[in-house]
Image: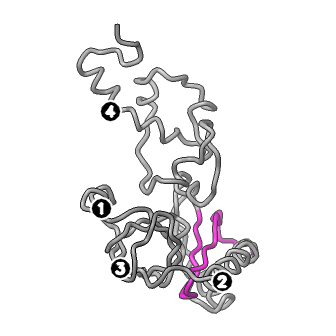
């Protein structure tokens, strides 16, 4: 049977096969990815309908096993090490004068590499930095530049709605949001109220946009109740 599993700090989605037993929603598993062995969470069965909703670049591989107590203990140890190693990376970056903001350090569960997520104004030449960090941590180092929006996926936050923000809970692709969407829906244009934790327009402005756009096309004022 195949399942859709999210894995990694950026909550990537992939299709993974597993033949040993049926896995319920929320099962914690070890999966094989191009980055190595990673922890993941089963989201649903990979039916044609659910797979069709994934980005075209999703990976397909297999679930190695469900997580054991030893796996869980190892995962907790890695997470504890991440903050200490992140602080060390920031120190090295500052000493080398590399202009970037380091957001998160991720240990790949199998030990194949560490991934550093960062933001920067433009392209960064980090070749020498990678050599120093690889020698420091004795493993492969991968640098991944992300946007401010994507950076929010690395943290859990509660939105104005009282629920966990969309990008850390279920969104696997950052939607395109514009001020025109807010104007069409006649919501307040106060930047404080229509901006998310990332400082950009809230992703939820995108959800009902098509409905409002269709109403405008048909000459219907979607902001007023029907009579």
Viewer-closest of 83 and 142: 83
Where is residue 102 shown, x and y percent of the image? 65, 66
Q: Say which residue label 4 marks.
A: 210
Q: State the extent of the magenta-drawn residues as a range.
A: 95-118
Q: How many marks?
A: 4
Residue 61: assigned label: 3
> Local crowd at mark 4 within 10 Å, few (<14), some, or many (≥20)?
few
Spatial CA distance of label 1 from label 3 is 14 Å
Does the rendering let one see residue 134? yes
Residue at left 64%, top 92%? 138
Name which of mark 1 and mark 4 comes first in the sequence.
1
Where is residue 117 shown, x and y percent of the image? 58, 68
Whether 88 is drawn above or below 192: the answer is below
Residue at left 33%, top 60%? 55
Name which of mark 1 and mark 3 comes first in the sequence.
1
Q: Secondary structure at mark 4?
A: helix
Which of the 4 image quadrants contains residue 20? bottom left
Are circles 4 and 3 on residues that touch, CB within 8 Å?
Answer: no
């Amino acid at each position: 049977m195949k399942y859709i599993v999210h894995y990694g700090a950026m909550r990537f989605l992939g299709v993974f096969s597993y033949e040993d037993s049926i896995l319920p929603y929320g099962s914690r598993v070890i999966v094989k990815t191009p980055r190595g062995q990673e922890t993941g969470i089963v989201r649903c069965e990979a039916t044609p309908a659910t797979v069709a909703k994934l980005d075209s670049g999703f990976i397909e591989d297999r679930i190695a096993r469900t997580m054991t107590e030893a796996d869980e203990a190892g995962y907790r140890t890695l997470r504890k090490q991440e903050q200490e190693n992140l602080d060390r990376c920031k120190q090295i970056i500052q000493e080398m004068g590399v202009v970037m903001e380091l957001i998160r350090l991720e240990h790949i569960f199998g030990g194949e590499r560490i991934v550093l997520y960062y933001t920067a104004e433009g392209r960064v030449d980090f070749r020498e930095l990678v050599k120093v960090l690889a020698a420091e941590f004795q493993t492969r180092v991968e640098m991944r530049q992300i946007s401010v929006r994507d950076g929010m996926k690395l943290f859990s936050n509660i939105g104005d709605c009282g629920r966990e923000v969309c990008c850390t809970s279920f969104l696997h692709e950052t939607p395109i949001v514009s001020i025109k969407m807010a104007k069409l829906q006649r919501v307040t244009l106060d930047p404080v109220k229509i901006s998310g934790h990332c400082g950009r327009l809230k992703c939820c402005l995108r959800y009902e946009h098509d409905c409002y756009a269709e109403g405008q096309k048909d000459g219907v004022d979607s902001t007023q109740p029907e009579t």
